[in-house]
Structures are given as C-alpha cells and as structure tokens.
Image (cartoon, rainbow, N blue to C red):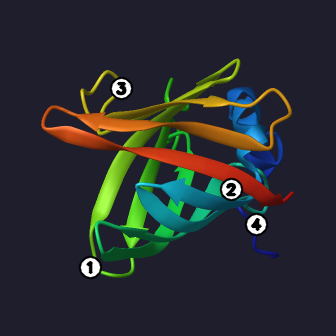
Amino acid sequence: MPKTNRNSASRALVWPHPDLESLRPLVGTWEVSGDTRGQIRFEWTEGGFFLMQHVDLVYAGRSIKGIEIIGHLQGAAQPPSKEIHSRFYSFTDGLTLDYVYELIGDTLTIWFGPKGSDNRFEGKISQDGNSFSGRWRWPSGGYNVKCTKILS
C-alpha cells in the first residue's frame, strides 16, 4: 500500500495570507545610513508564506548580523495570527528577538515585542519606493535610520 501524507490534500489548498503582500515594497537590498550603517536585504521564501530579512549592520560600534523571518504565526490546525510577526536570529550574540510588522499606505511600523509596544520603529516609504526613513524609539532613547534601495 503506498504511503500518503494525511496533510498533503489540505496543505495543497493553503495560500499565503494576503496581507503579507503589503510588505512587498520592502523586497530588495537596502543601504542603511543614519545612526546605524550597513545593509539589509528582504526576500520572499519559497512558497511565499514568509519574508526573510538578512541583516548586516553596525550600531553604536556593535556589529549586528542575522536573519529575520517575517510572517503570520500559525500552529497546526489553527488559523493564522491577525498580526504579522517576526523573529530575528542574531548571529553575533545568539539573541532571538520578536517583532510585529505593519505597513499601511506609506507608513511602516515595527514594534519590538507586541503590537502597541513603546519600543518601535515608525517610518515612511518614499513615493517612488526607493527609500524609507524613520526612527526607532523606546522610553530611554532611540535612533534615526534612512534606507536607500540599491537592488530590487
């Protein structure tokens, strides 16, 4: 008797959550300047369920390298989360950090931790989509960021 995958039929009908498409303007390679410097690159993973960010930055003299996987939380037999979540995996110090993404119109908000956190990035994407700038803010400080697209 041939082996079958009990989930194959149901998984074949599953599509990426449509609001992930809102993050499409981030896809590409970006030169980062301002209070932090380096490069970030966003790309879709196979299947389109996640957006992956590759990070190679220097902030306050500290190297930050890693990857971030961005998408909806979804357990087996559960619906996807309402918000777009992410987890950043730091190659330089082993940290795993959680975020929530939201892009509405030209306004990008990334909360560190849960949506509504007072530690967040707020920025604007340019009309031509070739740059975005904003500020990471938290109760005791923050820093400015400008990103310029160098490769689509």
Q: Is residue 91 left or right of residue 42?
A: left
Residue annotated with mark 4: 4
Tell me if label 1 and label 2 are in contact, CB under 8 Å. no
C-alpha separation, residue under disc 1 versus residue under disc 2: 40 Å
Q: Earlier in the sequence, mark 3 or mark 1?
A: 1
Tell me if label 2 and label 4 are in contact, CB under 8 Å. yes
Q: What element does badge 2 sit on? A: loop
Q: Is residue 64 left or right of residue 145?
A: left
The amino acid marked with disc number 2 is Arg
Q: Earlier in the sequence, mark 4 or mark 3?
A: 4
Residue annotated with mark 1: 93
Residue annotated with mark 2: 6
Q: Earlier in the sequence, mark 2 or mark 3?
A: 2
Above or below, comparing residue 151 to residue 146 in the picture? below
C-alpha separation, residue under disc 4 versus residue under disc 3: 40 Å
- Provide residue 32's location: percent of width, then percent of height: 58, 59
Above or below, comparing residue 49 to residue 94 in the picture? above
The amino acid marked with disc number 3 is Lys
**Nearer the observer, disc 3 or disc 1?**
1
Q: What element does badge 3 sit on? A: loop
Which residue, as the protein is rendered here, is positioned at the far front? 34
Tell me if label 4 and label 1 are in contact, CB under 8 Å. no
- Say which mark, if any, is on residue 115: 3
Above or below, comparing residue 114 to residue 30 in the picture? above
